[in-house]
Image: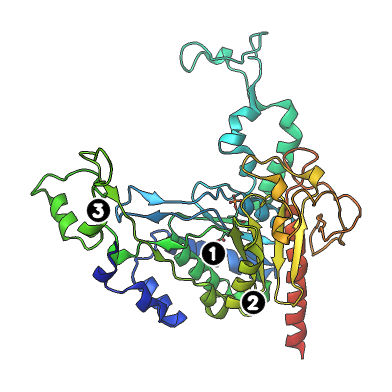
């Protein structure tokens, strides 16, 4: 069952458009996000500040995107991404001396505060109340009587075991803020994301080769185009005849009658609820436009590819690289993404695995350790401690090492949550900085000729 025939422009028609035509069709179909003007003004000021000091700027995209089912949105489709990759990477870019525009899904993890947010790292668990000055007994429970009496108020402090880690995070956060190195820009829907990406890339043009795009957001591949979207909340039960909503629903081409049906095959059909068939179109791919139009000349563009099937990952990453002709695709599997990634570059032998050695891997509830290595064609459990050190990189303080097989030294400590753990981003970012430095040097060389 499909509502394709009812559409004003079918996805087949749109597939025949040139990238530039697809761009104007898409962006003319939506009003720009309300925050866009303000974000553009902030980004312009941020970019000119850093162009002035010849600093490199990275645009990090992070988190999932929502796909609304209604124009006045009650329901939406979402994805798993919490923004860990983006938020963590942003910290390592800052450590490497980059200024960061952090384009993130609203309420996803943020650089620095990620250490103390969401339910797994609830900030309250890091706090304590000191004994009240007038009392010798420790107050750890509730004070009586609501706000209580000031005399029984102890100072709120960071628990002693977290002091060092929090001081370190706090200092880095304050340094980034005080030096105007971090610009946080939120989005929610896939359309908002695309508008923001396009604007920011154009605003970044004065940076030239000093610009880096690090596209870690999990952008939805499917959506409901505006001309098929219901205005109001999709009804799950009969709408009273004659009500404006019933007219709205029956007039609307957004959800055709034929796409909403009762569960007539169920042994006991429910009396009120209906099944809803959602018919999604592919989200237009704008990486072409980023590479060939929006982004600054000479800038470096890095995209991510996520797969769940190990046998697909490398091929899919390579296909993306060939299709969009950018500089690097970082491939990762859902189940091992915290411990290994693959760098796929245009060179004939351009496949390089970066892994956290076994003893340094962070704990992950969703991760499956015995899948590490499978996408490279290794047998389960074959990948362990072997390391080959790489030199320190970049114009900042690179501290990662890359696993390419063989034996070697243990890596230095990254910023993992426990002392022995390292975050894979502490290995990824110095490698990228090195590649970016090479590109910048090449661009400068070409300019001199
Ligand atoms: O947000 P997170 O840290 O849980 O996940 C990161 C990721 C897997 C979304 C990212 O590494 C990625 O692969 N992004 C691109 C996904 C894709 O469009 O294929």
Disc 3 to disc 1, how far (Cα)? 44 Å
Determine which of the numbered discs, if any, sits on residue 43 in the image. 1
Q: Residues within 10 Å of mark 3 (few under 14, many from 20)?
A: some
Residue furthest toward the left?
A: 242
Which sits earlier in the primary sequence, circle 3 or circle 2?
A: 2
Figure check: 261 above or below 346: above
Residue where numbered disc 3 is placed: 260
Q: Tell me how far mark 2 sits from mark 1, CA to CA.
A: 15 Å
Q: 95 and 1: which one is in front?
A: 1
Marks 3 and 2 close (CB-CB < 8 Å): no
Which residue corresponds to mark 2? 208
Residue 69 in the figure: left or right of residue 221:
left
Instruction: Report the mark closest to the observer, 2 or 1.
Output: 2
x 53%, y 80%: residue: 293
Nearer to us of marks 3 and 1 is: 3
Q: Is mark 1 within 8 Å of ligand 1?
A: no
Residue drawn at x 16%, y 57% is 250
For the residue carrying disc 1, how many other residues have a C-alpha within 10 Å: few (<14), some (14-19), or many (20+)?
many
Q: Quadrant of residue 405?
A: bottom right
| Sequence-wise first label, 3 or 1 | 1
Q: Nearer the viewer, residue 240 or 421?
A: 240
Q: Position of residue 121 (x, y in %)?
A: 62, 35
Query: Which is nearer the N-term, disc 2 or disc 1?
Result: 1
Mark 2 residue CB less than 8 A from any atom of ligand 1: no
Disc 2 residue crowd, few under 14, some 14–19, many 20+, Cα 10 Å: some
Q: Going by the picture, which residue comes out furthest to the top?
A: 136
- Res. 211 in view: yes
Q: Residue at x 69, y 59 (%)?
A: 375
């Amino acid at each position: 069952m499909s509502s394709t025939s009812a559409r004003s422009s079918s996805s087949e028609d749109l597939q025949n458009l040139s990238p530039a035509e697809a761009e104007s069709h898409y962006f003319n179909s939506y009003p720009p996000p309300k925050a866009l003007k303000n974000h553009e003004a902030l980004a312009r000021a941020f970019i000119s500040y850093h162009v002035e000091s010849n600093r490199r700027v990275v645009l990090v995209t992070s988190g999932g995107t929502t796909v609304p089912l209604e124009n006045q949105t009650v329901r939406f489709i979402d994805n798993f991404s919490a923004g860990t990759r983006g938020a963590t990477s942003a910290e390592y870019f800052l450590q490497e001396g980059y200024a960061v525009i952090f384009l993130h899904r609203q309420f996803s993890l943020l650089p620095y505060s990620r250490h103390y947010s969401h339910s797994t790292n609830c900030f309250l668990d890091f706090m304590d109340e000191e004994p009240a000055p007038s009392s010798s007994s420790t107050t750890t429970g509730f004070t009586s009587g609501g706000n209580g009496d000031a005399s029984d108020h102890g100072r709120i402090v960071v628990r002693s075991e977290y002091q060092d880690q929090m001081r370190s995070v706090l200092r880095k956060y304050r340094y980034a803020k005080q030096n105007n190195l971090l610009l946080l820009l939120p989005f929610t829907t896939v359309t908002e994301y695309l508008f923001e990406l396009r604007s920011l890339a154009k605003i970044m043009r004065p940076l030239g080769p000093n610009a880096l795009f690090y596209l870690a957001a999990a952008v939805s591949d499917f959506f409901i185009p505006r001309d098929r979207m219901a205005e109001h909340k999709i009804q799950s039960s009969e709408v009273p005849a004659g009500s404006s909503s019933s007219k709205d629903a029956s007039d609307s081409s957004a959800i055709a009658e034929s796409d909403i049906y009762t569960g007539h095959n169920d042994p006991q059909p429910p009396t009120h609820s209906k099944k809803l068939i959602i018919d999604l179109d592919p989200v237009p791919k704008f990486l072409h436009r980023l590479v060939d139009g929006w982004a600054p000349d000479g800038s470096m563009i890095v995209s991510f590819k996520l797969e769940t099937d190990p046998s697909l990952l490398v091929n899919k990453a390579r296909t993306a690289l060939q299709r969009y002709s950018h500089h690097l695709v970082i491939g990762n599997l859902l189940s091992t993404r915290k411990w290994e990634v693959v760098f796929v570059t245009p060179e004939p032998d351009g496949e390089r695995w970066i892994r956290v050695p076994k003893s340094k891997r962070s704990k992950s509830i969703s991760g499956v350790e015995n899948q590490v290595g499978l996408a490279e064609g290794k047998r389960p459990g074959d990948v362990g401690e072997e390391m080959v050190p790489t030199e320190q990189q970049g114009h900042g303080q690179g501290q990662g090492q890359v696993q390419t097989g063989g034996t070697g030294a243990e890596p230095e400590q990254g910023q993992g949550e426990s002392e022995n753990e390292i975050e894979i981003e502490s290995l990824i970012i110095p490698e990228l900085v090195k590649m970016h430095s090479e590109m910048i040097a090449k661009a400068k060389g070409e300019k001199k000729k």
